[in-house]
Amino acid sequence: MAMPDRLLARALLSTVALLVTLTGCASTQEAENGQALTFLQVKAAPDSFKGQSAVFGGKVLTARRQKDSTRIEILQLPLDRSLRPGYDLTQSQGRFIALQREFLDPATVPHGTRITVTGVVSGSITLPLDETDYTYPVIDIKRVQVWAGSEDMAPRIHPYMGMGPDPYWGPYWSPFWQPWPYW
């Protein structure tokens, strides 16, 4: 009888330890990624979230060097699990401004670049947008992740990969292949 009780106690203790560990990891990751603060919350009342951390991303619309900072106007897009902005522009919930206090060359974030910004909400600014005034939430940048090159491209999968012979299967796939001898 003593042996099954020990196994039961050990299993119960292991389960409790695992649950405590997973709960701690989930809350730490949520706090680090700024996931508790959504773009719609900040857009609705940016002044009430001043000083709070946020992680937003999207597509760069403009980047301009100002006297003491670089101002980046971004079309917000939802982020995936790896904090990479999506591709569907219809999923956007608005625009925001990201300010880099240190020098940031606007040429490094040209129009159309996908970026993720980690920073602190510093309020809002109203600027003209076409024929109206638009209130932009403002994020002071702590970190910028530029998704460029192969990271920005949607993954492509060869439709016939691993499904048997295809036109390129076999040792004679090269257009320069010739039978022996090579003279």
Image (cartoon, helix red, strand yellow):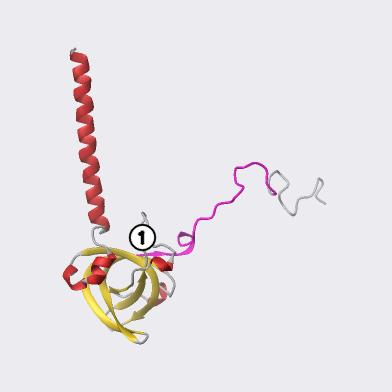
User: In the rendering, at what x and y percent does residue 24 appear?
Assistant: 21, 45
| Residue found at the very far top of the displayed protein | 1
Q: Going 45% across and 59% down the picture, which residue do you hit? A: 151
The vertical placement of 163 against 111, above or below, is above
Q: Does the magenta stretch include residue 162?
A: yes
| Residue 45 in sight from this viewpoint | yes
Q: Is the magenta stretch mostly helix, strand or loop?
A: loop
The vertical placement of 50 against 175, above or below, is below
Per the image, label 1 sits on a secondary structure element best described as loop
The three-letter amino acid code for the residue at tag 1 is Leu
Q: Which of 38 and 62 is in front in this view?
A: 38
User: In the rendering, at what x and y percent does residue 5 appear?
Assistant: 19, 18
User: In the rendering, at what x and y percent does residue 97 appear?
Assistant: 30, 75
Q: Does the magenta stretch include residue 123?
A: no
User: In the rendering, at what x and y percent does residue 62 appear?
Assistant: 38, 78
The residues colored magenta run 145-167
| Residue found at the very far bottom of the displayed protein | 131
Q: In this view, does 140 lie to the left or right of 163?
A: left
Q: How crowded is mark 1: few (under 14 residues within 10 Å), some or many (20 or more)?
A: some
Q: How many marks do you count on the picture?
A: 1
Q: Which of 65 and 84 is in front in this view?
A: 84
The vertical placement of 1 against 78, above or below, is above
Indicate the quadrant where residue 9 lies. Answer: top left
Q: Going 20% across and 34% down the picture, which residue do you hit? A: 16
Q: Check the picture and name the quadrant holding the N terminus.
A: top left
| Residue 144 in sight from this viewpoint | no
Name the residue tied to disc 1: 79
The vertical placement of 1 against 129, above or below, is above
Q: Going 20% across and 39% down the picture, which residue do you hit? A: 20
